[in-house]
Image (cartoon, rainbow, N blue to C red):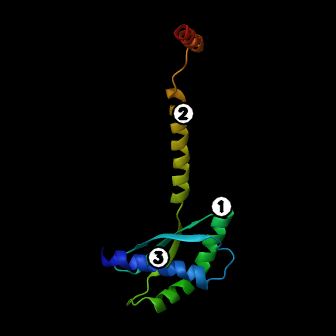
Amino acid sequence: MSRVDKVAEEIKREVGMIILEELKDPRLGFTTITHVELTPDLRFARIFFSVYGSPEQWKGTQTGLDHAAGFIRRLLGERLNLRFVPEVVFKEDHSSEYSVIIEQQLESIKQEQVVKAKPKRAKNATKKTTRRIKKKKS
């Protein structure tokens, strides 16, 4: 694991804790930091977030995070031992929504295949079976 990856993971953890404990903005709601992309010189960080909710909640969360970016950067500077605190930019991450949609589509395809794969019984299959049983009894 490279230094950039280690710092990115640390920033992800710290920003998640800052959002959970320090920020009191009601627009943030149920926000999760999914991953962080850092430039090789550690000067700029793209922080991706996910929100459980409607498109209006996504917009409100984006606005709240953009508004708190300076505060979050200052707290990162206090908590991380870095020469330069990276500039932070928040980006939406819709990958969890896509994975749910793909999961639903795969499940529907699976159900269609199960329905197609069921063998059809002959209409008079039960009659033949009952005849055989009667012959064996007598």
Which amino acid is tagged 2?
Answer: Glu
Instruction: Check disc 3 and give the amino acid type.
Output: Lys
Would you call the spot at circle 2 few (<14 residues within 10 Å), some (14-19), or many (20 or more)?
A: few
Q: Is residue 40 visible?
A: no
Q: Pick out the residue farthest to the left.
A: 2
The circle on residue 55 is: 1
Q: Which mark is residue 68?
A: none
Q: Secondary structure at mark 1?
A: helix
Point out residue 126 in the picture as x, y percentages from the top left corner.
59, 15
Q: CA distance from mark 1 to mark 3?
A: 23 Å
- Which residue type does callout 1 highlight? Pro
Q: Which residue is mark 3?
A: 12
Kindly identify which numbered label has been placed on residue 112.
2
N-term-proximal mark, 1 vs 3: 3
* Quadrant assignment, res 40: bottom left
Q: Is residue 27 above or below residue 92?
A: below
Estimate the x, y position of residue 92 in percent, counting from the top left.
54, 65
Earlier residue among tags 2 and 1: 1
